[in-house]
Structure formats: C-alpha cells, structure tokens
Amino acid sequence: MPFQWFVALRYMRDARGQTALILSAVSVGVSVIVFLSALINGLQSSLIETTLGSQPHVTIRVPREEPRPLVEASSQRSIARLIQPASQRLRSIDQWPVVMADAERIPGVTAASPTVTGSGIATRADARLPIVIRGVDPERFLAIINVPRKIVQGTFDVSGDSVVIGSTLATDLGVEVGDKVRVASTEGIEEVMKISGVFTLGSAAVDKTWVITSLRHAQSMFALPGGATTIELKVAEVFDADRIANEIQSQTGLLADSWMALNAQLLSGLSAQSSSKIMIQVCVVLTVALGIASVLIVSVVQKSREIGILRAVGAPANRVLAIFLIQGGVLGLIGSFLGSALGVIFSLLFETLTSGPNGLPRFPVQVDLELLAGATLLATGVGLITAVIPAGRAANLDPATAIRSG
Amino acid sequence: MADPILSVQQVIREYGDRVRTRALAGVDLMLDQGEFAALIGPSGSGKSTLLNIVGLLDRPTSGRVILAGLDTSNLDERALTAFRARTLGFVFQFHHLLPAFTAVENVMLPEWADRGIATREMRVRAEAMLQSVGLSDRAQFKTTDLSGGQQQRVAIARALVRRPPLVLADEPTGNLDTNSSEEIFELMRRFNRELGTTFLIVTHDPRIADRCDRTIEIVDGLVKSDHVR
Ligand SMILES: Nc1ncnc2c1ncn2[C@@H]1O[C@H](COP(=O)(O)OP(=O)(O)OP(=O)(O)O)[C@@H](O)[C@H]1O
Ligand SMILES: [Mg+2]
C-alpha cells in the first residue's frame, strides 16, 4: 500500500472516537442535503408534471386581429375614433403543414400536433355548459398529452362521432360512457356526439371543459375545412420551451406561447424554493467543512512530533501533505456514503409517513443517482479542500522544531 | 586515507531575530568512517543543535556540512530529504517511535516513507533487523506495549535498517535505567563493529562517554576538547 494511504488510514483508525464523531457530523450534513433536495426536487417535478400533463410545451397560433377603423381618416374626413375590437373569428394558420414541418425540424422539438381548438356549448337535458372543443389527430396529439393514461372510464376513441370528455364535465352533464351529448360550436353548427371515454388530467379547467374529438370533425364544426388553429409542440428539455417559442415567433410571425410564459407565477415560486434550497445547502456544506477542518487541525497539532519524525526518517513534504489530504477526502467520501444512505432512508420514511389515505404519497420525494453522486462529489471535494490548510501546515512543519517540542 | 564521512566547517547557528543567541559559534569537526564518538557538554551548550544540523534537519546560519563527500549547503528541501533518508540514521532520547504503528512497521518506515510503496523485501529486512536487536517476538506489538529499553532497540533497528554510513543519537540512554542503557550501548557498539557504521552519540552519562573511541566536548557553541582514545 502506498505509504501516505497507509499512514492516513492508520491515523484515522487509531483516533477512532474522533473519526466516528466527524463521520457522523458529515453524514448528518450530507443526509440533510440529500433529503432536502429529494423533497424539493420531488415537489417541483410533480408540480411541473401536473402542469404539463394537460398542456403542450409550446402552442403556436395566429395573432389576434388588430382592431382597425372601417373607414380610413383623411384630410377631408374626420372620423369618430370609437373602435370596436374585431370579432375574434377562429382563423386557421396559413399553410399549417409547412409551419408544423418547420417547427419539427427545430432541435429540441420532439413532437408536433395540429389542432382545431374553439369554444362551444354542450347540452344534455337541462344542463347547458360552456366547453372547449379540441379537434386532434390522435396519433400526433397523444405524443403531446398522454390522455389514454389518464382515462378513468371507457377508452380513448375519437373516430366518427365519438368524443372523450373531462370527468368534471361528465359529472356536471350527468353523463357516462355510451351516453350522447349535443354539442354546438360558436359557428352555430350543432352535432350529437357519443361519449367513448372520460379522463382526469388533473387540471380543473381542463377536466371541466375539454371535449376531444377528431381534427376533421372539429374542422367541420368551425367551418375551417383542412385548417388548424394551433400547432402544439413537445420539447425534450421542458425549460427550453421559452427559447424555442421565441425562436418560432421570430421566424414565423405567428404567436408562440411556452408553458413557462403561461405559468410564470408557478415558475417564480419554484425558483424561490430553489434558492432557499441552495442557501440551506451552502450552510450545511460550510458546517461540514468547518468540522473536518477543525478535527484535522487539532490532529496536526497533536501529531506534530510524529510528523517531525516522519520527515526525519525520510518522508518528503509532499507525502506528509498527502497523508492529511487523504484523511479529509476519505472522511468526506465515507461520510457522504453514510449520509446518502441516511438521506434515502429519511426520504422514504417521510414519503410513507405523509402518504394520503389512498396510499399514494402526498409529497413525492425524488431520490436519483445524480443527486447521490452530486452529494458524494460535493462532500469528498469539501473534505479535500478543507484538508488543504491543515495538510499544508503539516508539510511545512520544521522537523527540528517539531521533534524538539515533543 | 579515505574521505571523512562527515566534515563540519565553521558552522554558526543563531536563533532569534531581535535578540540573537548563538547556539553554535563556529564549529569545526571531522568524523572518519567507522568512528564511534561521544559528544558531551553542559546543558544548553549546543549539542542537539549541532546534531540537527549534521542530520540535515536544520540549516546552519553560516558554514558548511559535507556528508559522505557531498556539500549539503546547496541542496534544496526535496534533495535534502532524499539524501537524509539514504545517508543518516537517527536515534532520539524519547525513542520517538510512532505509537499508531507496530514495531515492524516502525522499522520499515525509513525505506517506506522514502520509496512510497511497501514491498515484501522491506518487511523481510525489517523483521531481520528486529531479530538482530533481539525483538523478533515483538514484531507485531504496538510500540506503546513495549518497555522503554525495547522501544529504544526498535529505534536502533529503525536507524540501521537501511545501513546508513552515519547514525546520530541524541541521548539514546537518557531515559533508561542502567541495565537498559548498557544493552543499548552494546547494541550500538556491535553495529559499529559489524557493519562499520559511524556513530555520533550525544550523552550526559560519563560511563558511556568513557567507553567511546573519541570524546568531543562542546561548551558555549564551540568545540572545547577532542580526545581520541
Ligand atoms: N529553536 C530554538 N529557538 C531559540 N533558541 C534555541 C532553539 N533551539 C536551541 N536554542 C538555544 O540554543 C542553545 C543550545 O541548545 P541545544 O538544545 O543545542 O543544547 P544542548 O546542548 O542539546 O542541551 P541539553 O543537554 O540540555 O539537551 C540553547 O541556549 C537553546 O536555548
Ligand atoms: Mg539536547
């Protein structure tokens, strides 16, 4: 075994009590970091997942028509400046297949789906409820929003006059799978449709209003033959959505909204959470670093005579340096293993203890390899770095003085 | 005649920045290979200081130390350490073994610390060395479990394991009873005879000093007398 490793490990074994104490301090610190990160990451990704479970990452649509006067003013004629907003008739994206093909080619975009989305009224017996009609190409749309996974009744089928509707809407209308419902679009076109499935996507607005039908069906209900009012995108990295939306917007002149713009409040909440997480982590790291440093400094002082002897019998200064760096690194490494294990146990325990009556966790914690590897790297690095000062002191001890002072 | 193993030339060592004390005030000293010399003198006369300078643990304020034919004044810290590891053995008063290590590990130290990696041969050499100081049955003992005399024998084994031409001993028997002192002295004498190792031994014990081949007396940082028997 290399000399410096042997001496370092022997010193740690010899000072068992000290080693155990500092190891527990490092472990507790690392476990706090692991547990806290797991909890916050879990919370954040479940929030984002819920949010994105019912909305596309990017939605491309036609800009609203600017209101303009019916008659242009001229020098001869002044006109009243009272202008009505232009009536917002649904409009199709010009050449939408081309726009979609272009969007699909942008790096980071993984799926694209055309829809005709408009408002309408659903009627059944006495109930008349406002709805959102979503005409989709099922194959493409399911890559954006995975409805079949959230079906609570029936199947996902939008062929012919079949529709799939939100569960709150189904309850409000008092309908079940197999029932018929009358649907009218804002274009005044009415149809009777058969409910093939009911879903719960988790967003109150969506579950209360959505009626999913085929693209062709919606095109005819809004008198937009062959048209598409939106193109919806899924991207590989959800936080790239803003950038991609901006890119599309500047390239096409169309409106492109990212989920991030639509959920700005959620995101600012998440980022506040992340900064408080980082604050706590920094404090814990500092505490751990001070702990390791103080133990090593004491150990260097205690062992100064021994270090002098090591130097006298032939240990070069850099090997003495290594002896103490190794101790710092090993303390960090072992501490991070113990701490990671402890943190995982805390996390799972917390998840179990706080799980709801249905057995599903209320606070899903997210422990991943990346987090554990990060904590290990961090603790080992901190151990090494904090060992630099005591190790440097040990290496620079004057052997004559050190031996004499014994 | 062969070159001396040690040549100390006009060595001065001062301590302190404002109030300068002269521990050594211009020492000249030569030792030939195979000599067995005692260094005596009153407390505070500069014996340990001289030994540290000869042992390359400390540098003189001025003057030169030539060891085994090499002028050490121009060596840097690294070269000094390596040269020290191969040329010198140390025995200190308080047997200065490492308490966290076993006897055999302590004896392996000089070679191990210098080369970096422990080898099978190192251990064999260390065990043989322990045997020659009569401690083969204590090889695996923690040094704190050994008696004072045994510890000092381990220290001698450690000093000699690499067969250095010069061994420096600072009051090697200072902490021992008469019997143990006798044992340690005999051990050093034996290695001097058998291996031709040069010894420079600081001692306050006249019985030890009288039985050395040469007695160098140092007073107030200067060599006062130098007798060869
Ligand atoms: N590191 C130091 N700083 C300041 N003064 C020192 C230092 N080391 C030694 N001295 C001084 O140098 C002088 C010689 O000390 P040294 O230890 O060499 O004496 P010694 O002959 O070994 O004495 P003893 O027999 O008591 O061991 C003393 O006056 C001592 O106080
Ligand atoms: Mg002394």
Image (cartoon, coloured by chain):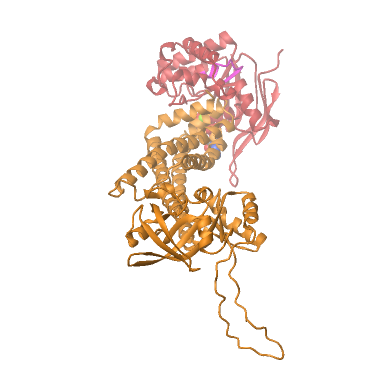
Residue B158 shown left or right of residue A169 in the figure: right
Chain B image colour: red
User: Eyeballing the image, is B25 above or below A136?
Assistant: above
User: Eyeballing the image, is B123 above or below A197?
Assistant: above
Q: At which x and y percent is residue A43?
A: 41, 52
Using the rendered view, name the quadrant where residue A292 is placed: top left
From the viewer's side, name the closer residue of B136 and A53: A53
From the viewer's side, name the closer residue of A342 and B39: A342
**Magenta part of the chain:** B158-167
Residue A124 makes an appearance in the image: yes
Q: Which residue is pictured at 60% across the width and 49% down the height? A: A108
Chain A image colour: orange
Q: Which residue is pictured at 67% across the width and 83% down the height? A: A72
Residue B167 shown left or right of residue B133 in the figure: right
Q: Which residue is pictured at 53% across the width and 12% down the height? A: B125
Is B160 magenta? The answer is yes
Using the rendered view, name the quadrant where residue A341 is placed: top left
Is B182 magenta? The answer is no
Q: At which x and y percent is residue A261?
A: 53, 62
How many numbered discs, if any?
0
Q: At which x and y percent is residue A202?
A: 40, 55
Q: Which residue is pictured at 68% across the width and 30% down the height? A: B75
- Residue sitting at the far top: B194
